[in-house]
Image (tube, helix red, strand yellow):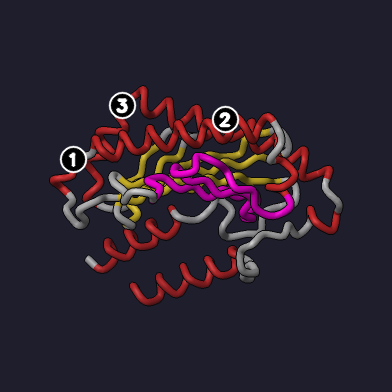
Amino acid sequence: MATTVGAALVLAVLAQLPPYFLWAAPADIHSLCLNFTVKSQSRPGKPWCEVQGSVDETSFLQYDSESNKIKPLGHLGKEVNTTKTWTELTQMLKEVGQDLRMILLDMDLEKNKTRSHPTLQAKMFCQLKGKNHLGSFWNFSIDGQPSLYFNVMNMKWIVINPRARGLKEKWENDKELVNYFRKISMGDCHHWLTEFLEHWKEMPASTSTVPVTNQSPRTPSISVISSLFIIGLIMIIL
């Protein structure tokens, strides 16, 4: 029993990390992550959808449904916020947020009453090496609980929270929804990341190497922290 629970916990942690979490990403590998947080209901004047965007783990945009505007962050955000791609991304974030909200409202909420107003967090990640697409995935959390992982490259779904098993079967059999997730994370994400990297390369070395954001200073390598956490978790469980 302990082994089964331990395996589930390790899987849940692994699913929240980028594909290269056990090693440092080579200099020619780049990633784009869009983290959506969607609420079924919100108070007047408060956004029902918020998005955080990052390139190579460095935040470069914030978006919220109340203002329907993207706020540029750091040097990269300021560099690309006047581009056509930025305008396209603003519209896409609005549309994806609306679609995710419809998905949230369509869920069988009778199975999960942990909150009166449920939330859905959808983290989309894509990775490139040069012009080649290395990987894409979606992580879904419901009411703050990691629930589903979708590997777009092999079209495989993984249930992290047993309560999401029914939802996984429903989404997996919805070809239109699956193709929608695939198009965004492989087609659109690839395009956006390629365009942003072109501007990144043109930036001065002093700013492109360590982009400045209004986040707190980055902690030591995520790969080191993640590895130690996984090892410690396994030792405790076993």
In the picture, measured across the screen, residue 209 lies left or right of residue 40, that is: right
Which residue is at 20% across, 57% downward?
114
- Residue that numbered label 2 is attached to: 188
How many residues crowd around disc 2 within 10 Å: few (fewer than 14), some, or many (20 or more)? some
How crowded pointer 1 is (Cα within 10 Å; few <14, some 14-19, many 20+) is rated as few
Within the image, what quadrant is residue 186 found in?
A: top right
Q: Quarter holding the N terminus?
A: bottom left
Residue nearest the viewer, comparing 183 with 24: 183
Decide: few, some or many residues near mark 3? Use Cα within 10 Å; few <14, some 14-19, many ≥20: few
Please tell me whether residue 72 is drawn above or below residue 187 in the rendered image.
Answer: below
Residue furthest to the top in view is: 176
Residue hosting label 3? 174
Residue for badge 1: 108
Q: How far apart are marks 3 and 1 (CA)?
A: 15 Å
Residue 88 part of the magenta-drawn span:
no
206 left or right of 93 in image? right
Q: Which mark is in front, 2 or 3?
A: 2
Q: Which of marks 2 and 1 is nearer the N terminus?
A: 1
Counting residues from the start of the chain, the first of labels 3 and 1 encountered is 1
Q: Which of marks 2 and 3 is nearer the N terminus?
A: 3
Return the residue found at the far left: 110
Kindly report which numbered mark, 3 or 1, lies closer to the viewer in this rendering. 1
- The amino acid sitting under disc 1 is Asp
Residue at disc 1, secondary structure: loop
Q: Which amino acid does label 3 sit on?
A: Asp
Residue 21 pos. (x, y %) = 56, 58
Mark 2 residue type: Asp
Queried whether the magenta region covers residue 66, the answer comes back as yes
Residue 40 at what x, y percent from top left?
29, 44
Report the span colored magenta. Answer: 46-75
